Amino acid sequence: MNTYASDFIETVLGQIKYKKAHASITVELQNHISEQAEGYMAESMGEDEAFCKAVAQMGNPAEIGKRLHKTHKPKTEWSIMLLLGAIVVFGLYIISIYSSLYFDYSIFYKQVFFAGLGICAIILFYFFDYTKLEKYSIPLYFVTSLLLLLAIMFGSKMQGRAYIQIWGFGFIPSFVAIPLILIFYAGLVKKWCDGNVGNLLKLIGASGLPLFIILLEPSLIYCSIVGVGLLTMFTFGICGGNYKGNRRKTLIIIYGSLCALVFLIFVYVLSNIPYGTERFTVFLNPQRYARGAGYTNVVLDNILSSSKFLGSSESTYISGNGLPSANSEFIFTFVVGSLGWLFGILLIVLLGLIILRLFVAASKVRHEYGKYLCVGICCVFSLQVIVNLLMNLGLCPIFNVALPFFSYGGASYLFNMALIGLLLGVYRRKDIIEKLERNSLSQ
């Protein structure tokens, strides 16, 4: 490249802080300057003079660099950041009330520590270049499945389920594996969701293995949450522009087969797993089992039905600290019972708004791998919120599902912060990645 052009491009790049965009911008500027110079040289102008004139017509390199910097500058979804900040503060306030009521302030201090770790996690994933993960989708698939299986086979047990304890942190293996499952499955959808029957079968098999392992934990609810996330990514892949098969026929076959499979699993759980049958029958008639398995359902109903719009509930279960898991699965009922429905509604509104903004942010991502990753994250996060609120309101059976950023616990905090950080990281680069891919295809 001519010296005039090289100096011009170097000055332009000096204004652009996002280094990954430098290569494509360099090629684009080189091509443009060369075309102009070749036109001048065709008019019998010397090479140096032609390039000098071509560069002069480009304009001020510093000004051009500043404009390109704005174009290639990473974008931040500030509405999600602000909502997340409000949720974190509100969640800590709720835990502080719980700590003062139970005279156990260590719970509040630990939750502050978990929040700090969560903020570190969101910063880490926000600045991490997610595109580097795509090429490792298949190795990550096998490693995640193997580690999950080993954790379930050789890990500790708590209430009949696999449980891992590391440095004072306790967590369910399938729960912490969800981000890894979403990451590798997004890559597999992009790789295999092309309309080829063989590739579709590989994709279905790839989703079936981790779900089967999670069922061995056993955890039907986390299997369902992950399954819905994977199914949503699969559906987006089928409806995407790279799918060459019959979309309608494929979706009918997949969803029809899935409905049949879910029905068979439901029948199997009711017929062969005692706690599954008990949980379902208790949900249908909790009063009948009020002194046994239905105790929690009755307590929840008692607190919510006697709660005021503002102020503490008249229920003795709140004043007498009789609400089980009040700081974890049933934190919503604790909020309504301790502070009133106004605060409960505020909690729902904040979580509803952040879910809405997460889906809106995901809809703006055009990069295929990033799009699949974002919709999977949105589904997994929103399903946690929906399931938890429904079981608190007595609209679904009780499961071991925490309410993100409100329930006490480190694993849940880190997990959900990592998910949102990853989505924000994808959104941050959405325009840049799209421009880079467009430029690479045009070269």
Image (spheres, rainbow, N blue to C red):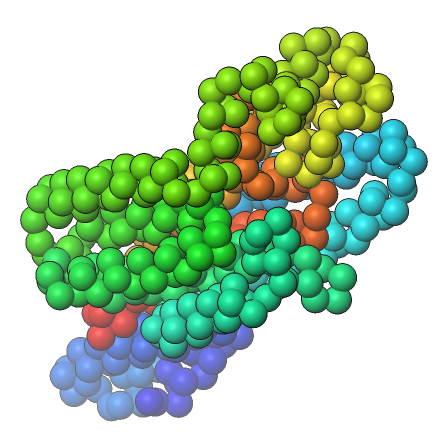
Residue 320 visible within the image = yes
Q: Where does the image place residue 220, in percent across and percent down from the top left?
A: 44, 45
Residue 133 visible within the image = no
Question: Which quadrant of the rendered structure holds the N terminus?
Answer: bottom left
Question: Which quadrant of the rendered structure holds the C terminus?
Answer: bottom left
Image quadrant assignment for residue 171? bottom right
Tell me which residue sits at (21%, 69%) in the image: 442
Q: Where does the image place residue 181, in percent across and percent down from the top left?
A: 43, 60
Tell me which residue sits at (47%, 25%) in the image: 281
Image vertical order of residue 199 relative to residue 75, above or below:
below
Q: Where does the image place residue 15, in percent across and percent down from the top left?
A: 53, 69
Image vertical order of residue 21 relative to residue 367, above or below:
below
Image vertical order of residue 108 relative to residue 196, above or below:
above
Q: Is residue 287 left or right of residue 86?
A: left
> 216 or 56: nearer the eye?
216
> 66 or 225: nearer the eye?
225
Tell me which residue sits at (70%, 48%) in the image: 409
Image quadrant assignment for residue 8? bottom left
> 426 or 386: nearer the eye?
386
Image vertical order of residue 160 relative to residue 35, above or below:
above
Q: Is residue 41 left or right of residue 181?
A: left
Tell me which residue sits at (17%, 65%) in the image: 199
